[in-house]
């Protein structure tokens, strides 16, 4: 004799805006990590090439050094020529700048040697475009995923209303406990829950047609 396990029927949820947003966010993290990896590698390569070609460590290949700094906005910072013997315009031409970049470079209009390099644009350029696109997509999903009257939603959590119930929002009201919503499904069944318990359905084709 076998004991029949009584398992709860698994609820199949439709794809929601939140699901899609999460996917896009995960992709964004991946791309950002990839950019970070590539940038770090470029930086290491750049630095070792700077050092191999005898780049000046005193001025970091800039030719100028900070002689006085007020530690404020940089308006009163004073700069001087690099005093390192053997550091000349010619040697700096050979070595280029080292891989660092700080606010003083910014004050002096020195471009970031890594992010302004052709190598960076060739490898990371299109990835940066992807980051912009993904960020735009997230904003778009946030806007389109906003729940209003008429939105098709699914109940994802909550104690009283049935989880997985899908319906159209026909009533929204603020209460002291949070925003409450009323849903009605295709069969005319209504449910009430909190706005925070529902998610807007993204893909209508993924809706699970139900009678109750
Ligand atoms: Zn120098």
Image (cartoon, rainbow, N blue to C red):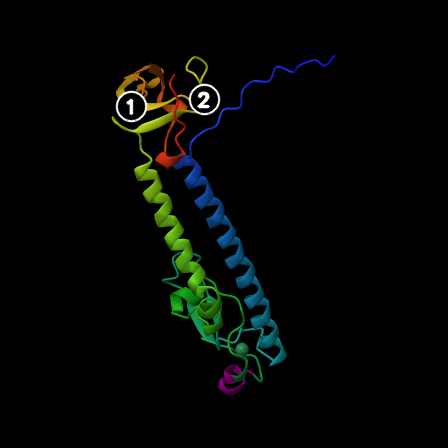
In the image, 80 versus 95, the foreground residue is: 95
> Is residue 134 shown above or below 6?
below
- Taking the image as shown, residue 185 lies to the left or right of residue 42, namely left
Residue 91 falls inside the magenta stretch? yes
- Residue stretch rendered in magenta on the structure: 87-93
Q: Quadrant of residue 182?
A: top left
Percent x, y for residue 132?
Answer: 38, 54
Res 179 label? none
Residue 131 falls inside the magenta stretch? no
> How many residues crowd around disc 2 within 10 Å: few (fewer than 14), some, or many (20 or more)?
some
In the image, 131 versus 6, the foreground residue is: 6
Percent x, y for residue 197?
Answer: 40, 23
Q: Secondary structure at mark 2?
A: loop
Residue topped by disc 1: 169
Residue found 72% across the figure and 14% down from its top: 2
Q: Secondary structure at mark 1?
A: strand
Quadrant for ligand 1 reads: bottom right
Residue topped by disc 2: 157
Q: Residue furthest front?
A: 1
Q: Residue furthest right?
A: 1
Q: Comparing marks 1 and 2, which lies closer to the viewer?
A: 1
């Amino acid at each position: 004799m076998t004991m029949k396990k009584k398992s709860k029927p698994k609820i199949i949820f439709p794809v929601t805006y939140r699901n899609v947003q999460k996917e896009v966010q995960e992709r964004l993290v991946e791309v950002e990590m990839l950019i970070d990896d590539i940038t770090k590698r470029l930086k290491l390569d750049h630095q070792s090439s700077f050092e191999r070609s005898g780049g000046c460590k005193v001025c970091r290949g800039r030719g100028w050094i900070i002689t006085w700094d007020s530690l404020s906005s940089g308006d009163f910072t004073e700069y001087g020529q690099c005093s390192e013997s053997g550091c000349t315009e010619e040697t700096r031409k050979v070595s280029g700048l080292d891989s660092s970049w700080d606010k003083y470079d910014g004050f002096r209009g020195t471009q970031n040697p890594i992010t302004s390099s052709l190598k960076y644009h060739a490898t990371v350029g299109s990835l940066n475009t992807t980051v912009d696109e993904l960020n735009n997509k997230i904003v778009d999903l946030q806007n389109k995923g906003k729940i209003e009257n008429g939105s098709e939603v699914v109940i994802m959590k909550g104690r009283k209303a049935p989880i997985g119930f899908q319906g159209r929002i026909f009533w929204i009201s603020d209460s002291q406990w949070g925003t409450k919503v009323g849903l009605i499904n295709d069969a005319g069944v209504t449910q009430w829950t909190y706005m925070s318990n529902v998610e807007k359905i993204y893909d209508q084709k993924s809706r699970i047609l139900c009678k109750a």
